[in-house]
Image: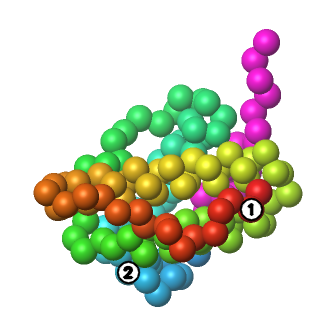
Amino acid sequence: MEDAPVCTEEEITTLVHHFYRRVRQDAMLGPIFDDHIHDWDKHLEHMVRFWSSLLRRTGTYSGAPMPRHIALPGLKGPMFAHWLSLFRDTLDEFDNPAFTSMAEDFARRIARSLWYGYQISHQPDQPVTEFDTHVPPAQY
């Protein structure tokens, strides 16, 4: 018997659109994203497929996010922590604990993976550091 999805496609679409609205309005992250995303509609569709593949196991996403993130200049650990904070703020809009818990867990793992990959690519002789030592534990 297959497990029921923890959320609807509508919830994922809402999450993605509301989250990236926050990102674009953010003083730290907005300029970085706006400099590198030239077609926001296409990016949002891509991100809906990404999150749907993770949270609903739809298999609609294909791609490799690591190379795009590694290519960005000047990223710092606090940026990833801030990204995660904005994501959590967006999850606060939902009354679906299973969805918010799973989404936050994936977001934390994604942020950590991208930050590790970024450090390894840019400073291969240095040990990797955590971006989130000051970020409170998941609250969902």
Which residue is at 79% across, 28% downward?
Answer: 4
Return the residue at label 2: 31
For badge 1, the amino acid type reads Gln
Horizontal and vertical percent position of residue 36 = 31, 67
Q: Is residue 17 magenta?
A: yes
Residue on which the image places disc 1: 139
Determine if residue 33 is in view: no
- At x 73%, y 53%, the residue is 100
Q: Visible in this render: residue 116? A: yes
Query: Residue at the front extreme?
Result: 127
Quarter of the image where one finds residue 116 = bottom left
Tag 2: residue type? Pro
Q: Secondary structure at mark 2?
A: helix
- Name, please, the residue furthest toward the top: 1
Of circles 1 and 2, which is in front?
A: 1
Q: Quadrant of residue 54?
A: top right
Q: Dot 1: what SS?
A: loop
Q: Quick one: 79 or 33, which is closer to the camera? A: 79
Q: Is residue 71 left or right of residue 9?
A: left
Image coordinates for residue 56, horizontal then vertical, percent:
66, 35
Q: Nearer the viewer, residue 77 or 67?
A: 77
Q: Which residues are magenta?
A: 1-19
**What separation in Å lies between label 1 and label 2 (alpha carbons)?**
29 Å
The x, y position of residue 11, in whole percent, is 73, 51
Taking the image as shown, residue 137 lies to the left or right of residue 106, namely right
Q: Is residue 30 above or below residue 123?
A: below
Q: Is residue 94 left or right of residue 48?
A: right
Choose the circle earlier in sequence order: 1 or 2: 2
